[in-house]
Amino acid sequence: MRPLYNPLVLVMTSFTGQIIPVGPDYAAVLAALHAASFAVAEQWPEAALRDLVVSYGTITGLAVWNDNPVGFVMLRCVAGEAEILTLCVTPDFQKCGVGAQLVAWAIQQAKRSAADVIFLEVSCKNKDAYTLYQKNKFVQSGLRKNYYPDGSDAFVMQYDSQKNSS
């Protein structure tokens, strides 16, 4: 697999790559993707990602386009519930459908794990991510004040598998 993404930026209108499940051997790739996608204070280190990938109930999907990793989603499914722990897409591949495919993959994995509901937190400042989740039938269910390192709040959103079974 090639490192991160091709420096030659291609204009894509819809993601045609694949999402593959990955484990701890991909911790460095996940950390590099996270670093490329988030502000320094919000980046997760390789060791933390490695620990999370192998923790009980965690499922991680890596988005790959032309052998280039371009994003990933990590969720934890336990006791009939799931939580999207993080989702990121490198800047060159944002707004190309990668995020939507990662959300759809996460929903599919949560349903396979018998999760009735999926939760996530999204920064109040991240309007694009909020819209992405809304389009995928997540609804706002709460607010966490001062949740992020920069002091910004997080919307708590949830997806109800029973309501959205079609």
Image: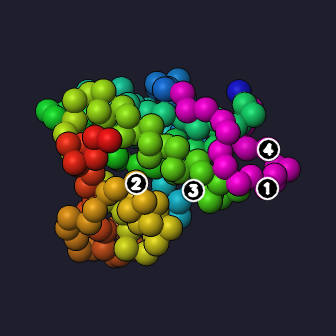
Image coords of residue 126 (percent x, y)? 46, 70
Find disc 4 in the rendering and name its residue: 6
Q: Which of pointers 4 and 1 indicates the residue nearer the eye?
A: 1
Nearer the viewer's eye, disc 3 or disc 1? 1
Query: What's the residue type where badge 1 is placed?
Result: Val
Is the Cβ of the residue at disc 3 closer than 8 Å to that at disc 4?
Answer: no
- Residue to which mark 1 is pinned: 11
Occupied quadrant, residue 3 = top right
Give the label, 1 or 2, closer to the camera: 2
User: Residue 111: which quarter of the image?
Assistant: top left
- Single out the residue that lies furthest toward the right: 8
Q: Tell me the CA gap for discs 1 and 2.
A: 24 Å
Q: Residue at x 49, y 43 (%)?
A: 102
Q: Are marks 4 and 1 in contact (CB under 8 Å)?
A: no
Q: Are marks 1 and 2 in contact (CB under 8 Å)?
A: no
Q: Label 1's element?
A: loop
Say which residue label 3 marks: 37
Q: Which residues are magenta?
A: 2-20
Residue occupied by mark 2: 136
Crowd class of label 4 (few under 14; some 14 to 19; many from 20; radius 10 Å): some
* Residue 45 visible (yes or no): no
User: Is residue 67 something that shows in the picture?
Assistant: yes
- Mark 4 vs mark 2: in front: 2
Q: Quadrant of the N terminus?
A: top right
